[in-house]
Image (spheres, grey):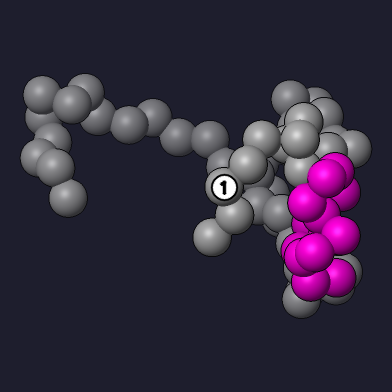
Amino acid sequence: MIISKISQISQEIKFLPDKIQKAINYIKQTDFSKLENKTYPIEGDKIFAVIQEYQTKPKQEKSAE
């Protein structure tokens, strides 16, 4: 698990595995508000981003997991 802010990750990224670095750089460089809901390859099918949008139920209709 990585606990950080994307704006501060540049100080920590060099300690992370190459594939995680690629994923984080993709997140930093991508405007997700302009993307459709689908899968976007970063490094073939080994690293990819999935954009999803859905409606959740009100918390009054659900119980805690």
Is residue 22 magenta-colored? yes
Q: Who's the residue at 13% across and 36% down the image?
A: 62
Is residue 39 magenta-colored? no
Residue 14 visible in the snapshot: yes
Return the residue nearer the eye: 2 or 61.
Answer: 2
Q: Reply above or below: 61 against 44.
A: above
* Residue with the mark numbered 1: 3
Mark 1 residue type:
Ile
Question: Looking at the picture, how far across and down is residue 14, in whole percent?
Answer: 86, 60
Question: Looking at the picture, how far across and down is residue 31, in whole percent?
Answer: 82, 29
**Which quarter of the image is occupied by the N terminus?**
bottom right
Q: Reply above or below: 23 against 9.
A: below
Which stretch is magenta?
10-27
Q: Reply above or below: 13 against 29.
A: below
Secondary structure of the residue carrying tag 1 is loop
Question: Looking at the picture, how far across and down is residue 20, in whole percent?
Answer: 76, 64
Return the residue nearer the eye: 40 or 29.
Answer: 29
Q: Residues within 10 Å of mark 1 (few under 14, many from 20)?
A: few
Q: Who's the residue at 14% across and 42% down the image?
A: 64
Left or right: residue 30 versus residue 32 is right
Residue 26 visible in the snapshot: no
Question: Looking at the picture, how far across and down is residue 52, in whole percent?
Answer: 57, 42
